Image: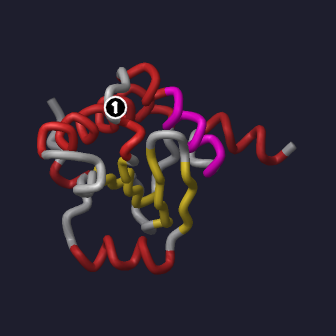
């Protein structure tokens, strides 16, 4: 298993930079904030505020987003910092549903490899 700690956003300055200067796109279950990072890797963070629910619901929503991201990670363009923010509509959803929603939002952002070709047409 790969060491994922270097691919995880933890620094508050990085979060502030993405919130202030980055772009965002809302989906059915998540909001995705992203910004180029000048690196050859994509760093991520999965966030669920108290609006999502109690600790069990917040942890489940983060797991759902993380698993959906993991499934499509090879398709994601490198060189971005991405924050996935859960919406309270994610409660009670299954992983395939969340993955489909995140895939659509990432495509709209132009962060999936095949979406770049579609956006250039």
Give the camera-side residue of 41 and 97.
97
Q: Is 32 positioned to the left or the right of 13 in the image? A: right
State whether residue 106 appears in this view.
yes
Q: Which residues are magenta?
A: 100-109
Q: Percent x, y for residue 4?
A: 19, 44
Q: Give the prevailing secondary structure in the magenta stretch.
A: helix
Judged from this view, the residue extending furthest toward the right is 121
Which image quadrant: the N terminus? top left
Residue 108 is a magenta residue: yes
Within the image, what quadrant is residue 98 found in? top left
Question: Residue shown at 27%/38% (left/top)?
Answer: 61
Question: Residue shown at 16%/45% (left/top)?
Answer: 54
State whether residue 47 appears in this view.
no
Give the camera-side residue of 73 and 30.
30
Within the image, what quadrant is residue 10 found in? bottom left
Within the image, what quadrant is residue 37 found in? bottom left
Give the camera-side residue of 2 and 100.
100
| Other residues around mark 1 within 10 Å, as few (<14) / some (14–19) / many (≥20) | few
- Coloring scheme of the render? secondary structure
Question: Residue shown at 29%/55% (left/top)?
Answer: 51
Which image quadrant: the C terminus? top right
Question: Residue shown at 67%/39% (left/top)?
Answer: 115
Q: Percent x, y for residue 13?
A: 27, 79
**Is 37 drawn above or below residue 94 in the view shown?**
below
Residue bearing the label numbered 1: 70
Circle 1 SS class:
helix
**Is 67 drawn above or below residue 52 in the view shown?**
above
């Amino acid at each position: 298993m790969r060491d994922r700690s270097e691919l995880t956003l933890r620094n508050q300055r990085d979060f502030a930079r993405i919130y202030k200067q980055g772009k965002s796109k809302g989906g059915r279950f998540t909001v995705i904030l992203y910004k180029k990072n000048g690196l050859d890797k994509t760093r991520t963070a999965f966030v669920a505020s108290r609006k999502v629910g109690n600790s069990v619901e917040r942890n489940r929503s983060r797991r759902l987003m993380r698993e959906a991201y993991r499934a499509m990670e090879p398709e994601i363009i490198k060189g971005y910092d991405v924050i996935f923010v859960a919406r309270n509509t994610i409660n009670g959803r299954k992983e395939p549903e969340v993955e489909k929603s995140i895939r659509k939002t990432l495509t709209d952002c132009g962060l999936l490899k095949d979406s770049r070709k579609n956006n250039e047409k």
